Image (cartoon, grey):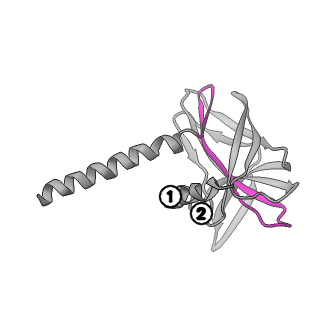
Amino acid sequence: MKHFVQKLATLAITSALLAAAPLSQAHEYKLGQLEIGHPYARATVPGQPAAGAYLSIENKGSAPDRLVSVSSPVAKSGEIHTMAMEGNVMKMRELDGGLEVKPGQKITMQPGNGYHLMLMGLSKPLQAGEKVPATLTFEKAGKVEVTFNVEDRNAAAAGKDDMKDMKGHMHH
């Protein structure tokens, strides 16, 4: 009996995970051979001049491409940044010439490591639950319109907080 219950529990968890999967899958964009996944931006506080924005880019083609710019109506400018440890100091700098995505490569931007986008000179604070339109420009593939979902600063990028968060946004 115990074995059966265990199997049942595993089955329930698996189907719950499968049911949740399409939710996160829906937020993707295709541009030629490039796939852009789950663009999101961090909520900001009043007076904060810039917001970090994140997404993943996968190159399914056979030629490299590069993200050369990002722009959004809510910001004066967009920049592509890299973060690297230099000694014990985290240095953030703008990438000259954009971000190359090699064939077969997937770059996943996350807070606190590697690459991210900065929306500079915000016209107003970004609030959790908002959707921010943006245009990504690639050297070869051209332009694609995406929507950054603004997420709470404290929420994990993708985790148990997502479901809790969604419930919270239902009554607005």
Q: Position of residue 88 (x, y in %)?
A: 63, 74
- Taking the magenta stretch, the answer to whether it contains residue 38 is yes
Q: Is residue 132 left or right of residue 75?
A: left
Which residue does the image show at 45% across and 46% down from the upper left?
20
- Residue at 78% across, 67% down: 45
Q: Horizontal placement of 48 versus 162: left or right? A: right
Name the residue beneath numbered marker 2: 155
State the residue position of label 1: 159
Q: In the rendering, at what x and y percent does residue 133 appear?
A: 76, 42
Q: Alpha-carbon neighbours of circle 2 within 10 Å: few (<14), some, or many (≥20)?
A: some
Q: Report the residue that reaches farthest toward the bottom.
A: 88
> Which residue corresponds to the image point at 49% horizontal and 60% vertical from the top-left?
160
For badge 2, the amino acid type reads Ala
* Percent x, y of residue 8: 23, 52
Residue 88 on the magenta segment: no
Residue 122 is labelled as none
| Residue lying farthest to the front in this orientation | 171
